Image: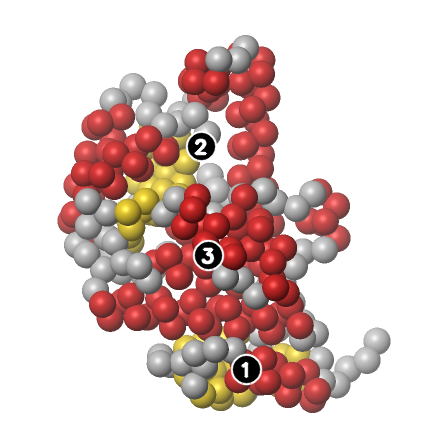
Amino acid sequence: MAIVAISRKVGSLGDEISQQAADQLGIKVIGVADIHQLAMQCDKELADICRTFETEQPAGFFERVFFRDPAGSSLFASLIYQQAAMGDVVMRGRGSQIVLAGQPKVLKVRIVAPFRLRMERIAKRKNVSLEEAADYVRHFDRQRRSLIESIFQVDLNDWSLYDMVLNSTDLPQELLADVVCLAAKELGPVSDEQKNKYSDLALAKRVEALIKKKVPTFPARDVEVETHGKGRLVLTGAVLDREAVKKAEEIAKNTPEVTEVDNQLRHTDLTF
């Protein structure tokens, strides 16, 4: 089995292939209702980022250029780790292939097809003209690419992010699902120990997001929250002043499930 993180282009049959693979493996696809439930559990200070995670709709151009929220990547990572803590599941999009890179029992898949074919599929599925379908495909391609670039600063078309890239142009959907299943079975199931690790990472990244949202930090010397398991966290990086160091520690200690905080944050006391 394993965790299957699927990135897909609209009209590539990515949703269909991921669902068929999940059915064959007997595991859950993280669906819209699950994502909504995760978003509803977000801290109110992070509601805007949670909404972006749920809808996969990035901020507008000027917001992305002039106001890139430093908490974004941390909260996205936390929500993805929460999904991973469920064990053997299929995840669709939202940067799961980036966050889970290097973790065991994770299969990272990209499903693609040429623009023309994707446009024709969308036109047929939605009963619209080819021109309307082309606009639809361009919109979603741009939206998903923009989301990942603004949150993680990586290119979705970087093939090194994936274990396999599947082209649905000529190969049957059933065969592509079989390929995903074969690879997932080869990796094997996620252990209970790894699930617990994902829960610990989710907590650490949630605290990290809250600190970045509420405490003045420096992008070049970012705040990082590491986990030692069982709610024990270590805060590292640099913040503006002594008050910021104390505030960050208070945020961590007041977060449910945190049992211990080792505050190694440094401060600069610089004024501009």
Q: Earlier in the sequence, mark 3 or mark 2?
A: 2
Residue 9: give its label. Answer: 2
Residue 254: give its label. Answer: 1
Pointer 3 and pointer 2: residues touching (CB < 8 Å)? no
Query: Which dot, 2 or 1, sits closer to the camera?
Result: 1
Pointer 3 and pointer 1: residues touching (CB < 8 Å)? no
* Mark 1 neighbour density, 10 Å: few (under 14) some (14–19) many (20 or more): few
**Is residue 68 in view from this perspective?**
yes
**Is residue 149 in view from this perspective?**
no
Give the quarter of the figure containing the C terminus. Answer: bottom right
The amino acid on which the numbered mark 3 sits, given as a three-letter code, is Leu
Q: Position of residue 69 (x, y in %)?
A: 65, 59
Q: Earlier in the sequence, mark 3 or mark 1?
A: 3
Q: Residue at x 68, y 83 (%)?
A: 244
The amino acid on which the numbered mark 1 sits, given as a three-letter code, is Asn
Q: In the orientation shown, which residue stands out farthest toward the right?
A: 272
Indicate how the structure is coloured in the image: secondary structure
Query: Which dot, 3 or 2, sits closer to the camera?
Result: 3
Q: Residue at x 66, y 79 (%)?
A: 239
Pointer 2 and pointer 1: residues touching (CB < 8 Å)? no
Give the SS element for disc 2.
loop
Q: Is residue 236 above or below residue 61?
A: below
Q: In the orientation shown, which residue stands out farthest toward the top?
A: 129
